[in-house]
Every structure is written in structure tokens, then in C-alpha cells.
């Protein structure tokens, strides 16, 4: 099986229902499914979080290691995002090297965190040109019921906010790890909001069936002051200028709503 | 000859259910005169027979079962259907066409295409062969309207209720046509989307609370309350 087959009558009903301004599961067009968030659930990782978005479930773990910087930015830490679609999440996921879906997922999450400058990477430099800290963000999709991007971005941010950075000192050009932890320096809270277009209507947080019938989708990552820092369009359809303006407004509203779940006050 | 649990109590695989002159039914086995469970489920003592109703299970086909299948492949001489079982089921072209079937003439895609839902009956199945289906009876065939709900196949009997009490209540209260597939797929078709939504909500509730008692009354109350709510909302508008 390579693709999930949604019955024709269900497809028709999704479109019909959305044209009437409602969705099959009873949500409004711009309603998210119930979001459940747990942070710090993996003891051996520096940071972790699990997000449930309806039946979609994503686990993110963060590791911090010492490594060499990129030669063009010698005094900044390194950020690496990797996503894995494990076979237990969906009958369509296979083992082996990541497919285009997993690569897109990792890159969109990466772009949101990188372009919003959420992590103060310049503070993660121990010895310029030689030793910096590498932040690995590993995304594991545990169950696929649509909208993996938003769930993953949310889980990644929740995990970052939960990440402990070990204390260290530099001695004779070597890094010595000291006991105790500090907080990883986080200065922005990017939230990804994905909108799908079905029959000329914009909906937020598409579930699995809706993803199968959508014409196209647009993900916008919104910074904490409401600015857009990253975008990704998927699918073969198109958006009109007006639709994009409308989508921007919806995304900004929704990002405030989602951010409240994570950042109190 | 003791039994070790109350009727409808939760048991786990390996639990000793009964000892002595009992017969092992579904999801149970007998060894040295003792009966053990093989599944996580609710134990049921029926005279001398001991069986376990699994909380979650795949559908295992039985001959004469009415099921709802989804076409996942079209071959040269028939269709393959996903019936929510560990095996794909076969529906032969010769069963659907009343005239002799010629592969070069008849376009199978135009009859049933991938993604179509079909109500069918199991005509043959054993553990060495994939299940074979038929649509050669009235009320069987392609589904053209309505919505599909998925429930755990083992809970279909609960959805029917004692002597059909639950299903007839559902039909009466929601005004929807409801077709039960033994494989856990339920077709709901009503006059409006709102009716269907109500029926689906009720079916989901039954699926979740199948092991509790007094369920029919609670579901009736829920439907009536929801219907009342909808009427009020319309008045306010």
C-alpha cells in the first residue's frame, strides 16, 4: 500500500460539508482539534515533548552535543532537525531512508525555528572556529491523522522550551562538562499554522481525509510579535492573492491561540 | 468445577477462567482441564461454554456475514477489497455481471473503481484461502450515499442490542438508515447531514461504552437532548 484510499463518498461528503461551512467531525472551518501537550517525558534527552492533535501524535526529543561549527559562521552553534515517519504511524510509512514527506516535514520545522532565530545560537559557541554545541531536534511521528507539520512544530518548540543545557568550562582548548544545568537560550516562539484549500474555502488543521481531498495547502510560521518568518506551500493547486491575505490573518489569530498553550502569560 | 470471574469481568491473556467440565469458546483455550483466556476482554460464562469478548480485535470473516468493503485494487477478473480483516477479500467479476464475463470487453473500472465502498456477503472463507464475496443479493452492492463510521468489530452485537433494541432505537430516534457491516464498518444515511451527525455521535458513544450497562437508555437520552438543542438553536435564529 502506498497511498491511503479514502472512500469516494467520504471525499464527496468532506467537500460538501466544507462548502456548507462545517466539517465532518463537527469542527468549524478555522477550529483546531483538541491539542494535548506534555513536556519533559524522555529522561535521557536534554529536552522532549509529546503533542497530540486529535489522533495525530508526535514525539520530539532534543540532544545537545559538542561538534565543529560551519566555516562560514565559526562562532555560532549548529541546529539540525530530523524527522522520522515510523511505520507504526500509518500503513503508508515504510522503513528505510526518509522519503520526501519526512524531508519536507523536517525542513519546514527547521525553517520556522531557524528564521525566527528562536535559539540564540551565538551563545552556543564554546571555542570560536573549533568547538560549538550542536542542537539535534529529532521528530518522531507516532500516529498520522493529518497535519503533521503543525503538530511537529508545536512539539519541537515545546521541547526546546523544556531543554536543559549542561554547564561547561573551557580549559586548555578542551570543553569540560560541569555538574548542573541551565536553560537553553530561547528568545522567540515560532508557531506553524497550516491551512488547506478545499473547494475555494480555507480550513485550518486538515485531518487525514481532508488532506487527501485538498487542492493545496499553505503553512505559515508566525513569530511571537505576529510576523511571518517562514512559509511552505504544498500540493498542486493554487491560491489567489486574496486567499493568501485571508490565510495570513487566520494564521496570526490561530498562532496566538496555540502559543497560549505553551507560553504562560 | 469452579469459575474464577464474574460474568463480564475484565480478563487478560493467560488468566485462568474456569476449571473442570467446561468448553472453551472464542478467545479461550483448554489445557489439562483448565480454561485460559487468549485476549484482553470481557469474560462470558454461558452454561458450560466460556468465551471472551475481545475489547479490540481485527475482523475474522465468517460465511454469511454481511460486510462493508473498500475497493483497493482492480484486477483482470475481479476486485480486491479491504474488509478490515488481516486478509484482502476477492470479489469476482463473474459474480457481478449476469452475462458471461469477457476480460477484453468488460471494463471493470467502470463497474467498481478504487475507493468505492461495497456492501457484500462472505460466501467462502477458511484459513487457507482469502475470503470470497458476493453482491448477488438484494440490498447488496455499491454504496452511493451516506456516511461511514468505523467501530471495533467485536462491538457490532452491542450496537444491535438485545433482540435489536439498540439499532431499532437508533433508527427511530435519528430517522437514519443504518446498515451494519460485521467487519466494523457502519453505513449511516439520513435526510440531512445533521441527522447523520447525530447517529454517528451515538454510534461512537456505544463503541466507547459498550461494556457498561443501561447504555440504551443513556444513548436515547443523549439523542433526545441533542435534538432538543438543535431545535432551540433554530428557534433562536
Image (cartoon, coloured by chain):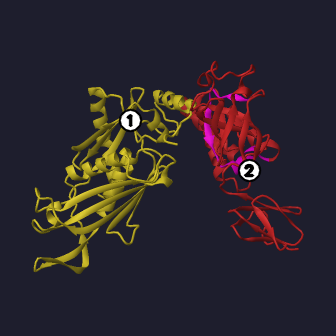
Chain colours: A yellow, B red
Which SS class for mark 2?
Answer: loop
Residue A154 picture location, percent across and down: 35, 53
Sort mark 2 into few (<14), some (14-19) or many (20+) by Cα contacts within 10 Å.
few
Discs 2 and 1 share one subunit: no
**Residue B155 part of the magenta-drawn span:** yes
**Residue A212 part of the magenta-drawn span:** no
Of B94 and A72, nearer the camera is B94
Q: Which residue is mark 2?
A: B127
Q: Is residue B99 above or below residue B125?
A: above
Label 2 and label 1: CA atoms lie apart by 44 Å
Residue B14 in which image quadrant: bottom right
Q: Chain of mark 2?
A: B
Whether residues under marks 2 and 1 lie with C-beta atoms below 8 angstroms apart, the answer is: no
| Residue displayed at 42% across by 26% down | A199
Q: Is residue B94 above or below residue A168?
A: above
Of B205 and A106, nearer the camera is A106
| Residue displayed at 43% across by 40% down | A206
Q: Which residues are magenta?
A: B140-161
Residue A88 picture location, percent across and down: 50, 54
| Residue displayed at 30% across by 32% down | A246
Which SS class for mark 1?
Answer: strand
Sort mark 1 into few (<14), some (14-19) or many (20+) by Cα contacts within 10 Å.
many
Q: Which residue is mark 1?
A: A196
Q: Is residue A75 above or below residue A35?
A: below
Foreground mark, 2 or 1, reads 2
Residue B8 picture location, percent across and down: 76, 62
Left/right placement of residue A212 relative to residue A74 reads: right
Q: Can residue A262 be seen in this snapshot? A: no
Q: Quadrant of the C terminus of chain A?
A: bottom left
Q: Is residue A140 above or below residue A237?
A: below
Residue B17 in which image quadrant: bottom right
Amino acid at each position: 500500500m502506498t497511498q491511503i484510499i479514502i472512500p469516494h463518498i467520504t471525499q464527496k461528503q468532506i467537500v460538501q460539508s466544507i462548502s456548507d461551512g462545517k466539517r465532518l467531525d463537527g469542527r468549524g472551518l478555522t477550529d483546531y482539534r483538541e491539542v494535548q501537550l506534555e513536556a519533559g517525558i524522555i529522561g535521557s534527552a536534554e529536552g522532549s515533548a509529546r503533542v497530540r492533535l486529535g489522533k495525530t501524535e508526535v514525539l520530539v526529543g532534543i540532544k545537545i552535543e559538542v561538534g565543529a561549527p560551519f566555516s562560514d559562521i565559526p562562532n555560532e552553534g549548529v541546529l539540525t532537525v530530523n524527522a522520522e515517519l515510523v511505520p507504526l504511524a500509518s500503513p503508508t510509512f515504510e522503513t528505510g531512508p526518509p522519503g520526501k514527506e519526512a524531508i519536507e516535514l523536517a525542513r519546514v520545522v527547521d525553517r520556522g525555528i531557524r528564521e525566527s532565530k528562536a535559539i540564540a545560537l551565538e551563545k552556543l559557541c564554546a571555542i570560536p572556529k573549533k568547538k560549538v554545541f550542536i542542537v539535534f531536534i529529532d521528530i518522531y511521528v507516532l500516529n498520522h491523522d493529518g497535519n503533521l507539520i503543525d503538530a511537529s512544530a508545536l512539539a519541537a518548540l515545546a521541547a526546546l522550551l523544556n531543554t536543559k543545557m549542561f554547564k561547561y568550562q573551557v580549559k586548555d582548548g578542551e570543553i569540560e562538562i560541569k555538574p548542573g544545568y541551565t536553560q537553553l537560550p530561547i528568545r522567540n516562539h515560532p508557531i506553524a499554522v497550516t491551512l488547506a484549500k478545499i473547494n475555494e474555502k480555507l480550513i485550518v488543521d486538515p485531518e487525514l481525509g481532508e488532506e487527501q481531498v485538498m487542492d493545496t495547502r499553505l503553512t505559515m510560521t508566525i513569530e511571537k510579535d505576529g510576523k511571518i518568518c517562514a512559509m511552505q506551500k504544498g500540493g498542486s493547486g493554487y491560491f489567489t492573492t486574496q486567499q493568501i491575505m485571508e490565510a495570513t490573518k487566520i494564521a496570526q489569530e490561530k498562532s496566538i491561540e496555540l502559543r497560549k498553550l505553551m507560553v504562560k502569560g | 468445577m469452579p469459575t474464577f470471574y464474574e460474568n463480564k469481568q475484565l480478563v487478560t491473556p493467560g488468566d485462568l477462567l474456569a476449571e473442570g467440565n467446561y468448553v472453551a469458546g472464542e478467545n479461550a483455550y483448554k489445557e489439562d482441564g483448565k480454561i485460559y483466556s487468549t485476549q484482553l476482554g470481557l469474560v462470558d460464562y454461558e452454561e458450560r461454554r466460556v468465551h471472551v469478548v475481545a475489547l479490540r480485535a481485527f475482523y475474522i470473516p465468517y460465511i454469511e456475514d454481511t460486510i462493508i468493503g473498500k475497493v483497493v485494487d482492480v484486477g483482470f477478473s475481479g476486485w480486491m477489497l479491504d474488509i478490515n480483516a488481516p486478509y484482502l477479500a476477492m470479489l469476482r467479476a463473474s459474480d457481478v455481471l449476469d452475462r458471461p464475463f469477457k476480460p477484453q470487453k468488460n471494463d471493470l473500472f467502470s463497474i467498481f473503481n478504487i475507493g468505492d465502498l461495497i456492501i457484500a456477503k462472505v460466501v467462502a472463507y477458511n484459513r487457507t484461502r482469502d475470503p470470497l464475496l458476493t453482491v448477488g443479493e438484494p440490498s447488496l452492492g455499491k454504496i452511493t450515499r451516506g456516511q461511514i463510521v468505523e467501530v471495533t468489530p467485536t462491538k457490532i452485537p452491542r450496537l444491535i442490542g438485545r433482540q435489536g433494541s439498540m439499532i431499532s432505537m437508533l433508527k427511530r430516534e435519528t430517522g437514519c438508515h443504518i446498515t451494519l457491516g460485521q467487519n466494523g464498518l457502519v453505513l449511516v444515511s439520513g435526510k440531512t447531514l445533521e441527522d447523520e451527525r447525530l447517529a454517528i455521535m451515538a454510534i461512537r458513544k456505544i463503541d466507547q461504552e459498550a461494556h457498561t450497562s443501561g447504555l440504551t437508555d443513556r444513548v436515547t437520552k443523549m439523542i433526545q437532548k441533542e435534538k432538543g438543542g438543535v431545535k432551540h438553536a433554530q428557534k433562536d435564529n
